[in-house]
Image (cartoon, rainbow, N blue to C red):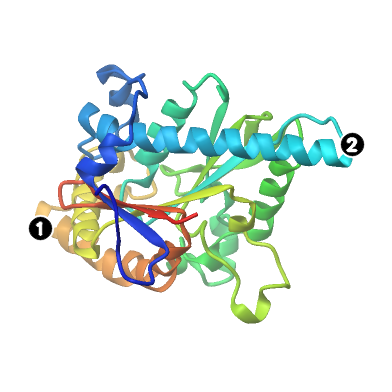
Amino acid sequence: MTATATAPLSRFLTFERDDWARLRDNTPLTLSEADLDSLRGLNEQLSLDEVVRIYLPLSRLLNLHVRAVQALYRAQQTFLGNHTDKVPFIIGLAGSVAVGKSTTARVLQALLARWPSHPSVALVTTDGFLFPNAVLEERGLMHRKGFPESYDRAALVRFLADVKAGYPEVQAPVYSHQRYDIVPGAAQLVRHPDVVIVEGLNVLQGPPVAQWEAQLFASDFFDYSIYVDADEAHIQSWYVERFLRLRDTVFQDPQSYFHRYAALSESEARQTAGEIWARINGVNLRENILPTRMRAHLILQKGADHHVERVQLRRV
């Protein structure tokens, strides 16, 4: 048996790693070791074996969904008597800071772009929709950066609405991790792609029950959604190790917002990273990000070594 229900009333099927790998079928491996070098995140152990066993089956599943939605869209256009171009298929990808969602997004972008039916795949991160630091400081929200209220959610919804409307060109703001701020005047141009991957902490968030008819959320525009999951203890460990790597690399740049951490000793850096996690990232994970996990269509559950150990797939 390749899948079992996680609980008697669960909406998900759970696949252990080997069972999920078999669902690759004949999907070809279209990435090389050199490709992976450009896709790996800082401090992540991404191997071709992980791509073959986890991401090829996932790209096959997403390809099937893209084709199905495109066919459904054509059917509706026929019914309406319209003959407009196809609209992009939008994938939402969520998860904690340091869980590896950016690497997952880049791998999926690379794999999906190699399917002949949708060669144009855009990747947009919601970091660009954070309010500028000046606005966050004015509102007393700098210590809440990354929390839902620190994003210009109206701008994100407008961006997704324009993408889904099939506009030939849509602009997204650009965020600099070095500056730790929005880049004034910079824009990412999204030109009518076949698929758009939207990656961010809170992209699966929905409205409170009392407001469900009052406003749109980013998740309302997603055709498919993925949550990258791991035990908080593992994520915190990855965050601390990443902080140490950044201390030795990016933080050394005098132009870096975090240059003040460059001279910390290893023990001081570990303590500082742990305090930041306890005060900000861990709180955001527990209060805002983790509660959206069960809204995803698919959950990738990672073990301590960053490898995906099991996959949960929502029943259709």
Position in image of residue 253 (x %, y %)? 32, 38
Asked if residue 238 is positioned above or below residue 215 in the image, the reply reads above
Label total for image = 2
* Residue in front for this viewpoint, 116 or 173: 116
Q: In the rendered image, which residue does mark 1 sit on?
A: 267
Q: Quadrant of residue 56?
A: top left
Position in image of residue 25 (x %, y %)? 34, 29
Q: Secondary structure at mark 1?
A: helix
Is residue 262 at all visible to an observer of this figure?
A: no
Checking the image for residue 207, the label placed there is: none
Q: In the rendered image, which residue does mark 2 sit on?
A: 81
Is residue 179 at all visible to an observer of this figure?
A: yes
* Residue in front for this viewpoint, 22 or 193: 22
Residue under the point 55% across and 22% down: 119
Mark 1 Cα shell of 10 Å, populated few (<14), some (14-19), many (≥20): few
Q: Amino acid at mark 1?
A: Ser
**Mark 2 to mark 1: distance in Å?**
66 Å
Residue under the point 15% across and 46% down: 305
Position in image of residue 217 (x %, y %)? 63, 61
Q: Earlier in the sequence, mark 2 or mark 1?
A: 2
Residue under the point 49% across and 22% down: 115
Give the residue at the far left of this rendering.
267
Position in image of residue 80 (x %, y %)? 87, 41
Give left or right: position of 242 versus 207: left
Asked if residue 303 is positioned above or below residue 307 in the image, the reply reads below
Asked if residue 219 is positioned above or below residue 72 in the image, the reply reads below
* Residue in front for this viewpoint, 248 or 297: 297
